[in-house]
Image (cartoon, helix red, strand yellow):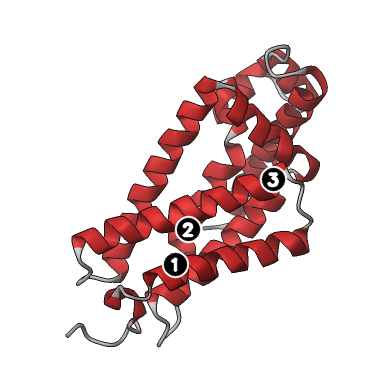
């Protein structure tokens, strides 16, 4: 990536973040139904056409940072270290990504969770994202552990995604500060890990051949 491309990508990320932040702020101040896309665009100092360049709909802007952070998972897992087990790499990646996710938008995190829990349309979108994430994690586990049993991969992905989703919702709903969030995420990952210690493929170093 050359310098010009890098600057362009950073500008896009800033604009996307500005739109999402403005949307959550307006949802908190005015209400979700009362806020229009034109309102969000004006608050973010962009044209409505620019809004649609980043988000297909008002519903999608609610999940902006979720989509962004989940997109980092594969990239972070690819940067694994020699001798590191898949489970160790997943812990490192998941805690870092989810800590950033829970901290995103600060005081408006609780607003986002309330919107999702109160509106069936947003609940449906959240469920679809959870399903997509679980399938993505399952695929990553197959790549990281070529010999992993099919049921082990499905169950491990389900345990990890379900457990982390519950903790993220709890932390955002109750306005956890950054240190408390990190502690909660570490604790949740430990619980998930303890449930996955029987999956042999997840506990062998990357460079150790399968039996």
Mark drawn on residue 77: 1
Label 1 packing within 10 angstroms: few (<14), some (14-19), many (20+): some
Label 3 packing within 10 angstroms: few (<14), some (14-19), many (20+): many
Q: Is residue 28 above or below residue 21?
A: above
In the rendered image, the quadrant that contains the C terminus is bottom left
SS state under label 3 = helix
SS state under label 2 = helix
Judging by the rendered image, the residue that carries numbered circle 3 is 172
Residue 79 appearing in the image:
no
Judging by the rendered image, the residue that carries numbered circle 2 is 73
Mark drawn on residue 117: none
Q: Is residue 12 above or below residue 37?
A: below
- Asked if marks 2 and 1 touch (Cβ < 8 Å), the reply is yes
Label 2 packing within 10 angstroms: few (<14), some (14-19), many (20+): many
Q: Of marks 1 and 3, which one's residue comes earlier in the chain?
A: 1
Q: Of marks 2 and 3, which one's residue comes earlier in the chain?
A: 2
Q: Is residue 2 above or below residue 41?
A: below
Q: 155 left or right of 37?
A: left
Residue 205 appearing in the image:
yes
């Amino acid at each position: 990536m050359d310098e010009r491309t890098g600057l362009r990508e950073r500008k896009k990320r800033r604009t996307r973040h500005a739109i999402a932040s403005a949307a959550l702020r307006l949802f908190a101040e005015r209400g979700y139904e009362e806020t229009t896309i034109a309102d969000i665009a004006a608050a973010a100092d962009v044209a409505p056409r620019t809004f649609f360049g980043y988000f297909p709909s008002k519903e999608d802007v609610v999940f902006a940072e979720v989509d962004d952070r989940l997109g980092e998972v594969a990239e972070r897992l690819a940067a694994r270290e020699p001798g590191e087990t898949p489970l160790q790499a997943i812990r490192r990646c998941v805690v870092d990504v989810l800590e950033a996710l829970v901290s995103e938008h600060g005081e408006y995190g609780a607003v986002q969770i309330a919107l999702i829990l109160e509106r069936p349309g947003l609940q449906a979108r959240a469920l679809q994202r959870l399903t997509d994430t679980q399938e993505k994690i399952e695929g990553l586990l197959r790549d990281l552990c070529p010999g992993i049993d099919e049921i082990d991969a499905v169950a491990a992905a389900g345990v990890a995604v379900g457990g982390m989703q519950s903790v993220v919702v709890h932390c955002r709903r109750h306005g956890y500060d950054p240190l408390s969030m990190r502690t909660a995420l570490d604790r949740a990952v430990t619980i998930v890990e303890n449930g996955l210690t029987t999956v042999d493929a997840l506990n062998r170093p990357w460079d150790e051949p399968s039996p």
